[in-house]
Image: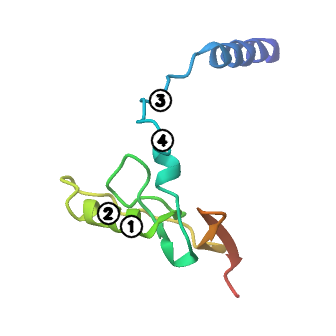
Amino acid sequence: MVRAMRALMVCLLFSCAASKPQAPAEAAPGDPPPALAAAECQADADCALTHVPENNCCPNLCVARVVTAKHAAELQSQAASCGRPCPRMSCAPPRFRIVPACSQGRCISKSVRQDD
């Protein structure tokens, strides 16, 4: 049984490694990639938290992700007009608080203990 499981794992590993990732859509010369453009910032105030996952309109992440403040506002307005009912998530209380910050021109997340 263990041998069969190992063989299956090896097959899965090789099939994942052999799969060719799709090339991203071509951007205009000089344009930053969309992911980088969405994360550009000058100060911590340029960054914000969102519970909306990428390519979705429902705020259903238990742990918020950091995006630019502009993108967070866009996501919030999209969530209001999602066109479908969004599920209410039941999440465990967070152990850490996520704080958005700007570091080297990119929005990043910092974890802070809840009691701070």
Residue under label 2, please give it: 74
81 versus 15 height, above or below: below
Q: Are marks 1 and 2 in contact (CB under 8 Å)?
A: yes
Circle nearer the N terminus (3, 4):
3
Mark 3 → mark 2, Cα distance in angstroms: 23 Å
| Residue occupying the far front of the picture | 30
Residue 98 image offset from top left, x and y in percent: 61, 72
Q: Position of residue 35 (x, y in %)?
A: 50, 47
Q: Residues within 10 Å of mark 2 (few under 14, many from 20)?
A: few
Which disc is residue 100 wearing? none
Amino acid carrying mark 4 in the image? Gly
Q: Residue furthest right?
A: 3
Which of the image's four quarters has the C terminus?
bottom right
Where disc 4 sits, the SS reads: loop
Q: Secondary structure at mark 2?
A: helix
Residue beneath the point at 19% across and 60% down: 81
* Crowding at mark 1 (Cα within 10 Å: few <14, some 14-19, many 20+): few
Closer to viewer: mark 4 or mark 1? 4
Q: Nearer the viewer, residue 19 or 13?
A: 19
For this rendering, which residue is in front, 27 or 70? 27
User: Which tag is nearer the camera, tag 1 or tag 2?
Assistant: 1
Q: Nearer the viewer, residue 103 or 57?
A: 103
Residue at left offset 78%, top offset 17%: 6
Q: Which residue is mark 4?
A: 30
Pointer 2 or 4: first along the chain? 4
In this picture, residue 6 sits left or right of residue 103: right
